[in-house]
Image (tube, rainbow, N blue to C red):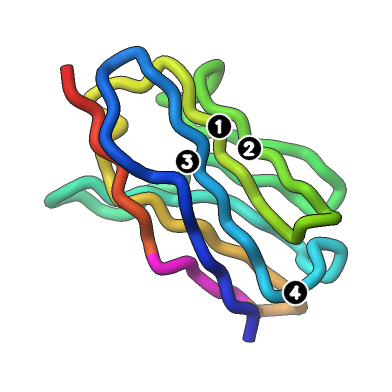
């Protein structure tokens, strides 16, 4: 089991920025993948961004060019830099990590609210 602790959410105005952090209990080099999902009220959880073990990144079309996913191996931390936030980005954001053939852990979820 890999434990995750998220931080950095909050309430902002449209156009502003936030950075989410997700600190893992396991070394980043041990993990096969890391990323972020979000779930808006009344909607299903959707993938926002992810980063593979080799460092490639992938983004949902709705956030491409505005969000950036990165990791710091020395701090065992995953980040999601969110710029030019929009009201439709309002959701609970969950980080996740994967390891081995089927291992997956989730963060506790952190709310992000964007007002127009």
User: Decide: marks 1, 2 in contact (CB < 8 A)?
Assistant: yes
The secondary structure making up most of the magenta span is strand
Q: Image check: 111 left or right of 32?
A: left
Task: Give the image location of residue 52, x and y in percent.
Answer: 75, 50
User: Decide: marks 3, 4 in contact (CB < 8 A)?
Assistant: no
Where are the magenta residues, as a range?
104-108
Q: Which mark is residue 26?
A: 4
Task: Tell me the element at label 2.
Answer: strand
Q: Quadrant of the C terminus?
A: top left
Mark 2 crowd level (few <14, some 14–19, many ≥20, 10 Å Cα): many
User: How far apart, in angstroms, are the residues tagged by discs 3 and 4?
Assistant: 22 Å
Q: Which mark is residue 69?
A: 2
User: How far apart, in angstroms, are the residues tagged by discs 1 and 2?
Assistant: 6 Å
User: Decide: marks 1, 4 in contact (CB < 8 A)?
Assistant: no
Q: Choose the circle earlier in sequence order: 3 or 2.
A: 3
Mark 3 crowd level (few <14, some 14–19, many ≥20, 10 Å Cα): many
Residue, disc 1 = 81
Residue, disc 3 = 48
**Residue 36 against residue 4 in the figure, above or below:** above
Q: Choose the circle earlier in sequence order: 4 or 2.
A: 4
User: How far apart, in angstroms, are the residues tagged by discs 1 and 4?
Assistant: 22 Å
Of residues 100 and 23, the one drawn nearer to the viewer in this rendering: 23
Q: Image check: 97 left or right of 85?
A: right
Asked which quadrant contains residue 23, the reply is bottom right
Mark 1 crowd level (few <14, some 14–19, many ≥20, 10 Å Cα): some
Q: Choose the circle earlier in sequence order: 1 or 2.
A: 2
């Amino acid at each position: 089991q890999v434990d995750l602790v998220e931080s950095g959410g909050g309430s902002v105005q449209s156009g502003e920025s936030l950075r989410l952090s997700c600190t893992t209990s396991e070394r980043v080099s041990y993990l096969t993948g890391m990323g972020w999902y979000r779930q808006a009220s009344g909607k299903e959880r959707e993938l926002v961004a992810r980063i593979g073990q080799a460092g490639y990144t992938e983004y949902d079309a709705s956030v491409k060019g505005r969000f950036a996913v990165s990791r710091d191996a020395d701090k065992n931390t995953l980040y999601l830099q969110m710029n030019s936030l929009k009201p439709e980005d309002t959701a609970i954001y969950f980080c996740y990590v994967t390891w081995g053939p089927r291992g997956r852990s989730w963060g506790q979820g952190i709310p992000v609210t964007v007002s127009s």
